[in-house]
Amino acid sequence: MKQLRKLMEKVRKGEGGFTLLEVLIVILILAVLVATVVFNVGGFVGQGTEEIAKMQCNVLQTAIVAAAAVESSSDVAAGSIGDSGTSITNPDDWILTVGGSDVAMSKYVENNITGYWEWDDSGTIINGTYTGGGGKTCTYNATAGWNCP
């Protein structure tokens, strides 16, 4: 027991804590780890906006086709949801002309959809704009496809 005490006393006398160099090395290693994580996660920022825009485009496309099928018509009048620069988010406010009669899109879309979406007479979306969180805007054009810078 005495030997163990003597050994512990010798160890305690030599304790002086960490040197400045050791602390700086640890901080440097942590900084490199944080930078690596931030760099790798940075690529995912804004990706949600693009996915939401594509999802809303698909929902609208399906709703237009469903409206045409239920109304037994392939005649879908050209139109748009929202004016350029404004958004209609409530499906109760959307009217689609199918087979010569007006159809409320709220019968086919449950959730609010934001943006400006325009379709041609075949019921295909030809232009779309969606602005998500952080002000990121995705645009869709039937010819050019998606552009989410």
Image: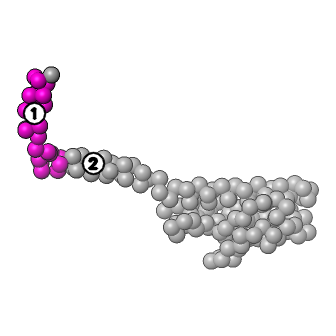
Is 95 situated left or right of 45 in this image? right
Is the residue marked by circle 1 packed among few (<14), some (14-19), or many (20+) residues within 10 Å? Answer: few
Disc number for residue 77? none
Label 1 or label 2, whichever comes before in sequence order: 1
Mark 2 — residue? 30
**Magenta part of the chain:** 2-25
Q: Is residue 106 above or below residue 16?
A: below
Residue at 82% across, 64% down = 106
Frontmost residue, 75 versus 112: 112
Q: In the image, is residue 44 above or below residue 137?
A: above
Compared to residue 144, the image places residue 26 above or below, namely above
Residue identifier under label 1: 9
Residue 55 in the image: state x and y as whole percent: 66, 55
The question of residue 10 being in magenta is answered with: yes
Viewer-proximal residue among 30 and 55: 30
SS under mark 1: helix
Of the residues shown, which amino acid type is indicated by label 2? Leu
What count of labels does the image hold?
2
Could you tell whether 30 is left or right of 135 in the image?
Answer: left
Q: Residue 101's image quarter? A: bottom right
Using a 10 Å C-alpha cutoff, classify the residue at mark 2 as few (fewer than 14 neighbours), some (14 to 19) or many (20 or more).
Answer: few
Determine if residue 145 is in view. no
| Residue sitting at x 67%, y 73% | 87
Q: Mark 1: which amino acid? A: Glu
* x and y percentages locating residue 19 in the rendered image: 11, 47
